[in-house]
Image: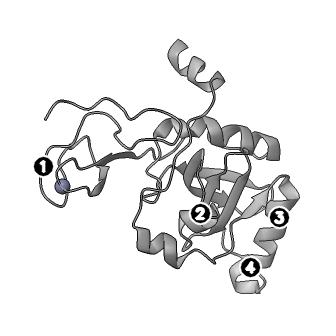
């Protein structure tokens, strides 16, 4: 669609951390994710992660990822917090990647699932160029696209499932549009109270 194409050529919105302050504080000294500037960076990370013969055989590795404002893709073990992977800063994209770790390497799954940053599905357009630079095959879009909303009544971050716009915590109605203020864009319009 023409509109989507235009979004791709515009500057990517930045997302700031919107998760609990205590997690950010706890992760302050955690090392950031490993920067993947070329494919060998990923190969080295996978090799270091799976030294034993048992783990080396695992076919698919799921990792935490962020794209930092300089456009660099950083990954960390799946248990890692996105805010730690990002070094505490803003991101252009965040979520999870599934990597088929047997040669030739391939991205078999991708999502924007990050409750720390709650990014919009369109953050794919910041991830894709970083994957293209690595020269790694990828699915061309999120295989699992998450819609996040903040509850206007209780403040809970919700992952909207099946279009069900109701807060999982308090039952209040959730807005139709993404409503986390991004760092560089004004907040999405919200309906009157
Ligand atoms: Zn709520």
Q: Is residue 161 left or right of residue 17?
A: left
Q: Which residue is mark 2?
A: 88
Name the one closer to the observer, 21 or 145. 21
Instruction: Give residue 142's position: percent from left, percent from top.
Output: 53, 42
Answer few, some or many: residues within 10 Å of disc 1's Cα (few below 14, many 20 plus, some between 14 and 19). some
Q: Earlier in the sequence, mark 1 or mark 4?
A: 4
Q: In the image, which is nearer the foreground, mark 2 or mark 3? A: 2
Between the residue at mark 2 and the residue at mark 1, the CA separation in whole angstroms equals 31 Å
Q: Which residue is mark 1?
A: 172
Between the residue at mark 2 and the residue at mark 3, the CA separation in whole angstroms equals 25 Å
Ligand 1 is within 8 Å of the C-beta of the residue at disc 4: no
Residue at point 76%, 56% (across, down) = 105
Between the residue at mark 3 and the residue at mark 4, the CA separation in whole angstroms equals 11 Å
Answer few, some or many: residues within 10 Å of disc 2's Cα (few below 14, many 20 plus, some between 14 and 19). many
Name the one closer to the observer, 190 or 6. 190
Q: Is residue 41 left or right of residue 186?
A: right
Instruction: Give residue 149's position: percent from left, percent from top.
Output: 31, 46
* Quadrant hosting residue 139: top right
- Badge number at residue 50: 4
Q: In the image, which is nearer the foreground, mark 2 or mark 1? A: 2
Q: Is residue 137 visible?
A: yes
Q: Which residue is mark 3?
A: 43
């Amino acid at each position: 669609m023409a509109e989507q194409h235009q979004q791709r050529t515009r500057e990517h919105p930045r997302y700031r951390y919107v998760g609990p302050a205590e997690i950010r504080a706890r992760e302050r000294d955690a090392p950031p994710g490993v920067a993947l500037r070329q494919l060998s960076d990923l190969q080295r990370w996978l090799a270091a992660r799976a030294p034993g013969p048992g783990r080396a055989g695992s076919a698919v590795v799921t990792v935490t990822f962020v794209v930092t404002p300089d456009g660099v893709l950083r990954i960390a073990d799946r248990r890692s917090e996105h805010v730690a992977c990002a070094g505490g800063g803003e991101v252009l994209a965040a979520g999870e990647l599934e990597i088929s770790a047997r040669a030739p390497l391939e991205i078999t799954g991708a999502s924007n699932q990050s409750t720390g940053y709650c990014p919009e599905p369109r953050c794919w357009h910041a991830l894709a160029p970083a994957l293209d630079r690595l020269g790694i095959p990828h699915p061309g879009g999120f295989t699992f696209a998450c819609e996040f909303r903040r509850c206007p009544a209780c403040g809970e971050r919700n992952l909207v499932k099946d279009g069900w716009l109701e807060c999982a915590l308090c039952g209040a109605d959730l807005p139709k549009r993404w409503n986390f203020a991004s760092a560089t864009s004004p907040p999405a319009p919200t309906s009157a109270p």
